[in-house]
Amino acid sequence: QFCMVSVPARLEHIGGNRFVRDGYGGQEVLTSIEGLTATDLAELNELVGEREDVNEFFVRPLASSPNPTELETLLNSLSARREMASILSVYECRDLAARVFGMTTIMRRMLVKYRFMRHQVETQGSGTAD
């Protein structure tokens, strides 16, 4: 899964060759993210063991983005504020959106490398058994 998302723009984005647009509360820059497929999640589940369900630990994109009114309602909700308070009491706010989006991209890329290495081991293993 691949999609484009908006994150708060920083000075280096505005002065660089990035697409910047008006967004929620200021300028935003578009960036790409890679999401995890059902196959990815199943494979991660195998890697971490049966006692863990990785589906519970990864954020997943919404089917569609909320409209501005829905977003404002969500941002003002107590449940969203409690979730953000929990996150911001542990992690710094700077580049939080980009970092959250980046975590699934990094995990996806690690899976691709793992699959390649596993294929190499399986290929070499079957070649030496003859």
Image: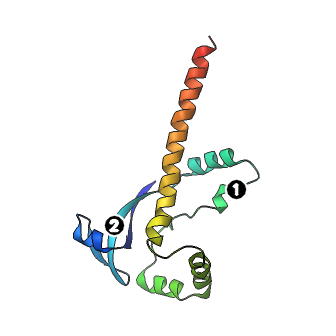
Residue at the farthest right position: 51
In this view, 113 is above or below 78: above
- In what quadrant of the picture does the C terminus appear? top right
Give how far across and how far down residue 8 sits, in percent. Answer: 37, 75
Where on the picture, by quarter, is residue 88? bottom right
Q: Amino acid at mark 2?
A: Leu
**Does label 1 or label 2 sit earlier along the sequence?**
2
User: Which one is nearer the viewer's eye here, 1 or 110?
Assistant: 110
Residue position for label 1: 53
In the image, which disc is placed on residue 77?
none
Q: Using a 10 Å C-alpha cutoff, classify the residue at mark 2 as few (fewer than 14 neighbours), some (14 to 19) or many (20 or more).
A: some
Q: Position of residue 84 (x, y in %)?
A: 57, 79
Question: What crowding class fits label 1: few (fewer than 14 Cα within 10 Å), some (14-19), or many (20 or more)?
Answer: some
Q: Is residue 96 left or right of residue 86?
A: left
Of residues 49 and 15, which is closer to you in this image? 15
What's the residue at 54%, 38% (across, down)?
Answer: 115
**Against 57, is 11 above or below?**
below
Q: Secondary structure at mark 1?
A: loop
The residue beneath circle 2 is 30
Residue 117 coordinates in the image, percent (x, y)? 54, 34
Looking at the image, the residue that sits furthest to the top is 130
Closest to the observer: 62 or 99? 99
Examine the image and state in which quarter residue 43 appears: top right
The amino acid marked with disc number 1 is Asp
* Mark-to-mark CA distance, 1 and 2: 31 Å
**Which element type, helix, strand or loop, lies under badge 2?**
strand
Q: Residue at x 47, y 86 (%)?
A: 72
